[in-house]
Image (cartoon, grey):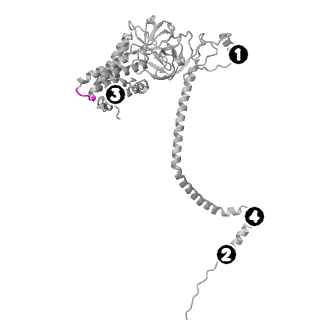
Amino acid sequence: MQSHKRAPQRRLPFREAFFLAALLGAAVAVSWASGRTMVLNEIFAPVLGAVEHVTGAWNRSVDRVKALQTLEADNHVLRQRVEELESQSSAYGEQYAENARLHELLKMQMPPDVEPIIARVIGRNPDNWHQRLVLDVGSAGGVRLNGVAVTRRGLIGRVVAVSSNTANVALVTDPASSVSVLNTRTRSAGVMQGQGDAWPALRYMEQPEKWKMGDRLITSGFGGTIPKGLPVGKIVRLKNEKGAPGAPVQALLFPELRVAAAVDLDKLEEILVLPPGLTAVPTPPPPPSPKPKPSPSAGAKARGAAGPGGAAGARPTARPGPRPSPRKSP
Amino acid sequence: MPITLVQALWLLIPVALVWQTSDLAVLPYFHWRLDPTLALVILAGLLLGPRHGVWFGLAAGAGQDLLIGGGLVYGLTKGLAGLVAGLAQPQIYRLDALSLALVGLIWTIGEGLLVALYLFAQGRTAVWDHFAAQSLPLGLANAVLIVLLYAWLGRLPPPEARET
């Protein structure tokens, strides 16, 4: 007789499950009754967090794969955008600098009825012997032969050739340039001749023994083309030796003095062109000075010194009044 | 159709003139301005003969004079440079880098001397210091420039080669 041994039947743990459910129900009921309505969230929070972690990682992976498809195109677009912005930034910087330079030029007080022309330097002489500029304004823009080229710092040169849309300016260092100058210390006159290098020479000086290194020179106004009083430069060299400031010029029978121009002629970008034959000189703006503390006595003194109609220290040649707006080169 | 030497030179001369008027032609350390038109004129004389040399020299020099604002000093000196280079060409044993550099150096100094004499005749007495300071560095720079230009222009066919 074959005996069959019956395998032990696995019984579902109904009783334990019921016990747990009852316990859970009781806990929920007690929590609900005590006002803790978020009890289920608290119970399931670890599970929800784990599920969210997994699904989040999955979603991010999917997004990353999707982004890879457009990455190259996006990169191309962004690179173009960066190039555009860099170009714009550079252009804005250049415009800002130009604006500042033009602003400086326009600060000059012009004599009445004088219409200065702002010109841009577009070229230089193509050799090593001349010192000339090519301007982007010509006779059509109002530039005339022998017009006077200046910046805020002083004299640059003279217009020596004009076409309808360009003009050539011979700098004070050009061999063709001769400017009559005055020594501001001794008030004696001389002639400054360009030599083709950076240092024009002084000739035909009155009382040459009185001229010293470091003396400042202005235009004398002799000849009638260039107005009197424009800063020209200062004496810096005797022959080819650097002279100490204040040293007298007595070493030579025919001393050859060299002058450093008041304007840095290598770094000109925009200049003013004045008509030839001016008698009044344009004056640079006064340097900014700290405002004194207002006091009644000082104010009265200042008013007295200025007189009834003008400012103290104002040059007679630069009369205040409506200044004509300068023409800008096209 | 390959470009001929004459065409290349006529194209290069305006380019060289514009280059000379810009700050790009200034040697960085010495602050002297290169003279590529002179280099082209000398090459025109050496490679094409005195007649072409004179015409190229006159044209390039006149252009330079116009850019300066008048005068004819460079028209004459560069015309002379083209003529001398063209006449000297048969005397040169072989056109190599050394002979080209020597011609460039000598004529750059020669042109400087002529311009200095011209200015001296106008009453500028300080031109000799300027000449002494500029002639050697400028001549050396132009000598190098001529050799470099010859490396390209020397390969181009002269006008008669195109006709045949």
Image check: B106 left or right of A242? Answer: left
Amino acid identity at mark 4: Trp
Residue B6: which disc?
3
Amino acid identity at mark 1: Pro
Quick one: SS at disc 2?
helix
Does mark 3 fall on the same chain as mark 4?
Answer: no
Q: Position of residue B127 (x, y in %)?
A: 37, 14
Location of mark 1 (residue): A296
Q: Which region is colored magenta? A: B93-97
Q: If the image is split into quadrants, where does the C terminus of chain B sit?
A: top left
Label 3 crowd bin: few (<14), some (14–19), many (20+), radius 10 Å:
some
Q: Chain of mark 2?
A: A
Task: Kindly identify the residue that appears in the image at 34 percent across and 17 percent down.
Answer: B77
When asked about the image quadrant of residue A11, the answer is bottom right
Q: Chain of mark 4?
A: A
Does mark 1 fall on the same chain as mark 3?
Answer: no
Instruction: Please tell me whether residue A191 is drawn above or below residue A327 in the rendered image.
Output: above
Location of mark 4 (residue): A32
Real-space Cα separation, disc 1 to disc 4, in angstroms? 83 Å
Instruction: Please tell me whether residue B149 is drawn above or below residue B110 in the rendered image.
Output: below
User: Would you say the residues marked 4 and 3 are in contact, meaning their CB atoms lie under 8 Å apart?
Assistant: no
Real-space Cα separation, disc 3 to disc 1, in angstroms? 83 Å
Location of mark 2 (residue): A16
User: Would you say the residues marked 2 and 3 are in contact, meaning their CB atoms lie under 8 Å apart?
Assistant: no
Does mark 3 fall on the same chain as mark 2?
Answer: no
Q: If the image is split into quadrants, where does the N terminus of chain B sit?
A: top left
Q: Position of residue B11 (x, y in %)?
A: 38, 28
When asked about the image quadrant of residue A291, the answer is top right
Is residue B15 among what the camera can see?
Answer: yes
Amino acid identity at mark 3: Val
Frontmost of labels 1 and 4 is: 4
